[in-house]
Amino acid sequence: MGKVIDSIISGTSGRTGRIVIANVNGYEISRIRPKKSTKAPSPKQALIKDRFNKAVLFIASYREYVKAFFGTKVGLRSTYNAAMSNVINAFQCDMENLEIIPNYHQIQFSKGKGIDPQPLAISSPTPLTIVIDWADNASGTIAETDYMVALLAEDNDLNVGTLFFQTTSIRADLSHEFTLLPRYQDKELHVWIAFVNADNLFASNSAYIGKIKVS
């Protein structure tokens, strides 16, 4: 038994048995609800589930950002789902050793039509600081006023969240210094940057800079 509602305004919705009908962003779709399993997951199944959970944790700090600045929505595929897929694909499952290997250089947190960043260096000149230097590859254009955003992730520790920063530094400033909490001292962090235009209309692709040990 079930109930299905057909509405001109809201579309078709409802369910019958395990089949669920819904209107998602103007598309009418049907899904089959999965059966609850009483079996314990196999080690490989548990690893795949763990990879998904770690991807959710990784993206949590910039979740709202990717909703606005990770390409464009295509059909039912949201920009958030596209960003999640990027992280999941970068987290390689080693089925022999049952471990997750993060390929940080494959991760992007920003996609757009802005001028791509041209990072030059990262350093940690004083305790609990990271300095990022980049080239002004938009000299003489309005893109010089794009502001910088950055993502930081601890090396090979997928059980902690990432750090996302929206700064006031613009492309023409050529450099930005971050001050970190004491817990990050002597930690190795992976660093990415991107630029967002001053009117928040679009962003650039993100660039992976590399890894730095915090002084």
Image (spheres, rainbow, N blue to C red):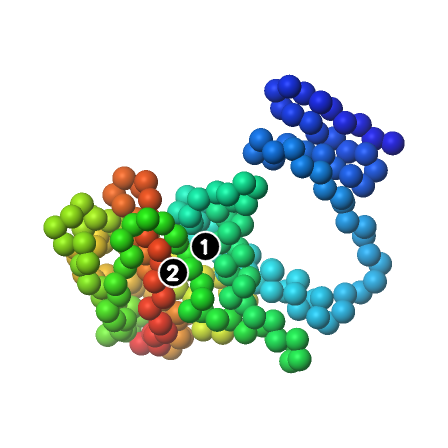
| Residue at 19% across, 63% down | 135
Residue 208, x across and y down, in percent: 36, 66
Which quadrant: the N terminus? top right
Which image quarter holds the C terminus? bottom left
Q: Can residue 149 be seen in this view?
A: no
- Residue nearest the observer in this picture, 162 or 86: 86
CB-based contact (under 8 Å), mark 1 and mark 2: yes
The answer to which image quadrant residue 181 occupies is bottom left
What SS does tag 2 mark?
Answer: strand
Identify which residue, 110 or 122, lies in the foreground.
110
Q: How far from the left and from the top, in percent, is residue 193?
A: 33, 60
Q: Earlier in the sequence, mark 1 or mark 2?
A: 1
Q: Residue 98 carries which label?
A: none
Q: Spot the residue most to the left.
A: 140
The image shows residue 1, relative to residue 196, as above or below, that is above
Q: Mark 1 points at which residue?
A: 61
- For disc 1, the neighbor class at 10 Å (few under 14, some 14 to 19, many from 20) is some
Q: Give the percent coordinates (x, y) of residue 201.
A: 32, 40
Pick out the residue farthest to the top: 8
Residue 13 location, x and y as percent? 70, 29
Residue type beneath disc 1? Ser
Q: Is residue 57 positioned above or below 215 on the image?
A: above
Kind of residue indicated by mark 2: Leu
Question: Which residue shows up at 32% across the image and 48% down it?
Answer: 113
Q: In this view, does 134 lie to the left or right of 158?
A: left
Query: In the image, which disc is placed on residue 151?
Result: 2
